[in-house]
Structure formats: C-alpha cells, structure tokens
Image: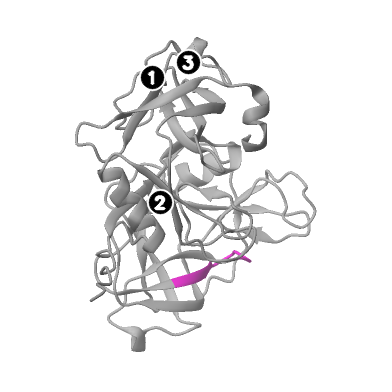
Amino acid sequence: MTLTPSPPEPLSAPLVVEFPFTRSLGPVQSAFLTGLRERTVLGVRTEDGRTLVPPVEYDPGTAAELRDLVQVGAAGTVTTWAWNPEPRRGQPLATPFAWVLVRLDGADTALLHALDAPGPDAVRTGMRVRIRWAADRGGAITDIACFEPYGGEPDAGEPAPHTGEFDRPVTGIVAEARLDYTYSPGRAQTRYLQGLAERRTVGERCPSCAKVYVPPRGACPTCGVATTDRVEVGPRGTVTTFCIVNIKAKNLDIEVPYVYAHIALDGAGLALHGRIGGIPYDQVRMGLRVEPVWSEDGRYPDHYRPTGEPDADYDTYKELL
C-alpha cells in the first residue's frame, strides 16, 4: 500500500509593517496645522482665485508657488460620503461613523474627515456639518476630532485674509504609517519555513530554466510554471552586494553601524537578504564567504559570519548581483 504524505498544516502569523518618520513643514503647512491647534482653519488662494483646503504650497494646475493664506469657516457641506460600520484601531471614532468630504464655507475644495452620525440614514450629500474640535490640540489634523451635523446656513462671505502667524508655530510632525495584517504562506513558503525550523534552507527549482528560488515562490516568475522540485541549498554562501546601516531602527537591538547584504547561498539561483556579523563592518566585501548563525530558538539565521574561506571569484556570482 502506498501512503500519500498529508499536506503541511497551513501557517499564519500576525505581522505589522510600521514606519513612523519625522517630516518638516513648509510655511503653508506649518500655518495650517498651527491654525488647527488654535481652532482656526486656513486655506490658500490660487492665482485664479480658488481657495484650497487643505492648503498646498504649489498650485496643482500651474505649479506656481502659493503663499496667500485665508481663513475659511468651521462649518461646511458634505459633497460625498461612505459609511464605516466597523472602525479600526487608530481611526477618529470608536463607534460606526461616516467618512465624508466636506467643502468648508469659503473653500473650493473638500476636506476628508469623519462625521459622527447615528447611522447611514442620517447622512446625505448636501447636509450641513461643522467641526467638533478636540479637547487637547497640538497642531495636527486630529485637532479636528470629527464633524457633526449642523443646522446653520452656508456663510456667503469671502474668506478673510490671514497672515498665518501664530505663537509657537508647528514646524514638524511625526507621520505614523502602520499596516496590521495576518500573513498566510502558501505551499512553497510553508515548506521553506518548516525547513528553517530544522536549520535547513530549502528552495524550489524551475523545471524549465532550472533556476533555484530561495525563498521559493511556488512558481517561476520568468517562465510562469509551477516549481515543485525541492532543493536544499547552502548553508554557506557568498556576499554579492551590501550596504552599511548607520541609523538605528526602533525596537531593533543591534548596534550601528552594521552591514546588511545580499547573500547567494551555494546552489541558489538568486540572492537573499541577511545581516553580516562576526567581522568589522568596514571589512565586509563583495565575494566574502559566509555561513549562518542561527537564532537562539533555531527558527531562522540570526546573521551570517565569515567562514574563513578565500573570497569567491567575481565570475561565480556576477549573474546574481
């Protein structure tokens, strides 16, 4: 009797891609965000007389520099909307709300924000709304807590000129970019991860071009055919290219400077990423022969270190650069 091996158990894991960065502000954006802190909404006037809110520093049509600031109203009209029944972490409201584009009184463009409404039946295009200011404001778009329904009539007056000058202007912000998701590898990646748990690096060979992909992708991106022939590669390899990292990453317990490299494992048809350790950063070079140093739990190579072998000849890895 022939036994057919059962397929590997599907794997999944929560992953977070996060990249907070500091951004400096020009005079227009600085005035706009500082104004929100002071419960003042500023727009910018274009050469053809339109008022843009949020303001930009260059005309999107002519690329002309814009500096003519004006103050618009804190109430406006909904131009379009979409209901959000399940708010996510970090969104403006914790209860169901509507995303709305609001053209504030005196503005010619619309501002995107949240509208606090009891349900989708309470929202419509053309409805009047006004800003609900946050109790604690520091110079960010979140100084507008949300919009709320408002019964007042549109302001027919012209936007008032504004100098854009405030005490303690906001000159920079930290922009938080974050994506939370659950990753589920396919057949090829699952087997690759299971191999790493056994301190083995396993790729897959394309039956057409014979290139060995590590990590495997389940199909050859060049030939477009499935890759099912499993091939163990390495564990040693060759540094093809590298960079020296001088900026310490958040929550990463590695002292800078350090080297991150492309490493072509012996038998692989392309290079993978890995950190180089066990050698001064300024002695890492192309052609350096390296081997893996596994993590304490043995699930993946923590870094690669020199093997002590002579450097590889350039011709042996030039196609993998």
* Residue 84, image x, y percentages: 35, 75
Segment tinted magenta in the rendering: 100-109
| Disc 3 crowd, CA 10 A, few/some/many (<14, 14-19, 20+) | few
For residue 258, what is the image quadrant?
Answer: top left
Q: Amino acid at mark 3?
A: Glu
Foreground of the two, 220 or 135: 220
Residue 26 part of the magenta-drawn span: no
Above-or-below relation of 223 to 315: below
* Residue 105, image x, y percentages: 54, 67
The residue lying furthest to the front in this view is 1
Task: Look at the image and tell me whether residue 243 can be seen.
Answer: yes
* Residue 194, image x, y percentages: 29, 51
The residue lying furthest to the left in this view is 297
Q: Amino acid at mark 2?
A: Arg
Tell me the distance, in whole angstroms, between the alpha carbons under discs 2 and 3: 67 Å
Above-or-below relation of 276 to 212: above
Q: Amino acid at mark 1?
A: Gly
Mark 2 vs 3: CB contact within 8 A: no
Q: Which residue is mark 1?
A: 277
Q: Secondary structure at mark 3?
A: loop
Which label's residue is closer to the chain start, 2 or 3? Answer: 2
Which label's residue is closer to the chain start, 1 or 3? Answer: 1
Tell me the distance, in whole angstroms, between the alpha carbons under discs 1 and 3: 16 Å
Residue at x 47% of width, y 61% of height: 218
For residue 158, what is the image quadrant?
Answer: bottom right
Q: Which residue is mark 2?
A: 39
Q: Which residue is mark 3?
A: 309
Which label's residue is closer to the chain start, 2 or 1? Answer: 2
* Residue 303, image x, y percentages: 36, 28
